Amino acid sequence: MDAETKLIQRIARAIPSESGAGKGGRPTGGLRLGIGNDGAVLAPSGRTEWVLSCDAFLEGVHFLADRHPADSVGFKSLARATSDLAAMGAAPRYFLLTMALPLRRTGEWLDGFLQGMARASRQLGIRLIGGDTKRHASVAISITVLGEIARGRAVTRAGARLGDIVYVSGKLGCAELGLRMVKSGVLKRGKPGAGSEISLLKQHLYPRIRMKLGAWLAAHRIPSAMMDISDGLSTDLGRLCAASGVGARIWAERIPRVKLPEAQAGLLERLKLDPLQLALHGGDDYELVFTVPRRKVKQLRNAPDFADLTAIGEIERDNQVTLVGANGRATRLVSGGWDPFRKK
Amino acid sequence: MDAETKLIQRIARAIPSESGAGKGGRPTGGLRLGIGNDGAVLAPSGRTEWVLSCDAFLEGVHFLADRHPADSVGFKSLARATSDLAAMGAAPRYFLLTMALPLRRTGEWLDGFLQGMARASRQLGIRLIGGDTKRHASVAISITVLGEIARGRAVTRAGARLGDIVYVSGKLGCAELGLRMVKSGVLKRGKPGAGSEISLLKQHLYPRIRMKLGAWLAAHRIPSAMMDISDGLSTDLGRLCAASGVGARIWAERIPRVKLPEAQAGLLERLKLDPLQLALHGGDDYELVFTVPRRKVKQLRNAPDFADLTAIGEIERDNQVTLVGANGRATRLVSGGWDPFRKK
């Protein structure tokens, strides 16, 4: 057996995967043929729609192979790709994994990576059905995810209307704080440092994805527009507004942000970080930002994770995002999140 | 507008793409929502199946950004991904493009790349519906293709049976010869050299994909097993046999290979290349290898590209590929093609 085929079999054993070999050749769960072929074959029922998205996760850009634990790289690469399904309200079903690896990462490092990815796969209920493996000078991961949703229920970025309320889930800026901690050396040789700091690193290393919330919102047709916050609120809310042809006004005081316990309060000062700036511009949180017509706001009370939702502002006519400070002064909020192609 | 959004719009303008905005919100061609959202949304009819495959194309591994013309990189990355659809008999429909780029490749180089990809997209009838863009130290392309096929008609690697005839399309080894020519300096600063050599480089730079042949074979249920030759005949026929639980015996004299016109005959000698070895082990040809039950062989005469088909051997019980030389001696054919994870 050639080495590439062996590697594919090792991946398929480690990660919950689907060969599509249902009983009597009948497709199971909409899948006729899975991993181990030129392509995977889906046999859609015609009663649902399929959502497709892809996401790349690159050594030296999104993670440092010598600092970030291998299982975090595996977990996060799958979680962040799946977050795009949550953002549209689709239920995760299958994924394809494209991996480019140096030979020296095919041993222990790969085992750790696959362990983390297997954990994300089980948590998110998404199974491997194919992919591609290549040798490369550095680790490059590219994942295509497939989700399923009732006909016509996928939520896009483009439906926000004048007067809609802008909501976000969770606290923003946690992942960016984690990244800064790793860069400043808190995370050494792939292991988190002091126990109390592990929880701060969690959203950076093993992000929680808002699958249930996204699916519930879509199923109940509550949001007029929705997306996940992967590049920072200032960038992503700007994109939602641009796609909808509207603007937004948000209040700085309402934006849910990192609040550290007394014992760790010095950390922000040491790293010269401001919680509001982290919340406005920090990337990688994978929380949801969505807009809700006023008449539907009451229905939100039944949402999963309702306690984690915050109304931060509303949709305006103006084609820009305006931030109202604690002093009442309004300024234009410029995209300051993660934009890889901005010239510095 | 942020720089990433601008880049996405530039890509969507250059390449035939689909936003899914059909009249009155009705899905067109099975697509409800295309490029410019968190994910693309497919609205399958339920009458067909969808084939999904992905393929990575990496600078320094599969191409040299300073030697290979940018438009070849764009053309080939899409063509080779689409070849996996041909290999199963599916008709190409949509693709997602994940691109990691250094900033210095976002100007003229990207224009050339997009031009080549647009040409492949038109030739193959496959349209862009989404993707991901990232900044990176080197160019890394990952493409997910989607094809459509009648229910139950997708051809896999796993159906070859004792006595079936093994066919290949085209001449094998042409692409490998092209690669060796590029490496030896025939291709300088992204431009092919002498006119007569351009045709030799064609299958390496702008590979022809056997879409019509693959679709016709699948539609007429002729092959018992099929795949494309991307990693060399010795590797890929070995994979087809392993998936089918059989072996094969092929005749060296029958294998269609590179034959140079008198004027260029010296090239093979200069590069120390043997046409049979190129044909057995050279990668990147994207020709099809497939097996046909004897009773169906006659039907092949109506195949598109029939003149390009060659019977090279037959399926045996033995779990190996046997090569019979011109002298009648049989030897085991060991995988000698492109296997990125083999330790040298």
Image (cartoon, coloured by chain):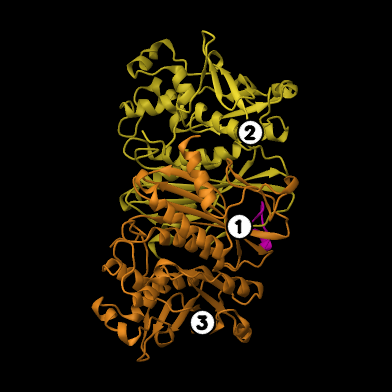
Chain colours: A orange, B yellow
How far is mark 2 from mark 3, CA to CA?
A: 52 Å
Give the Cα distance between marks 1 and 3.
34 Å
Regarding residue B16, the answer to whether it shows in the image is no
Q: How many marks?
A: 3
Disc 2 secondary structure class: helix
- CA gap between label 2 and label 1 equals 39 Å
**Main SS type for the magenta part?**
loop
Viewer-nearest residue: A98 or A316: A98
Element type where label 1 sits in the image: loop
Residue A308 circle label: 3
Q: Nearer the viewer, mark 1 or mark 3?
A: 3
Residue B20: assigned label: 1
Q: Are marks 1 and 3 on the same chain?
A: no
Q: Residue at x 35, y 75 (%)?
A: A195
Residue at image coords 33%, 29%: B183
- Where is residue A90? Give x, y as percent: 61, 65
| Quarter of the figure that contains the C terminus of chain B | top left
* Number of other residues with Cα within 10 Å of mark 3, as a class: few under 14, some 14 to 19, many 20 or more: few
Amino acid, disc 2:
Ser
Q: Which mark is residue B244?
A: 2
In magenta, the rendered stretch is B22-31
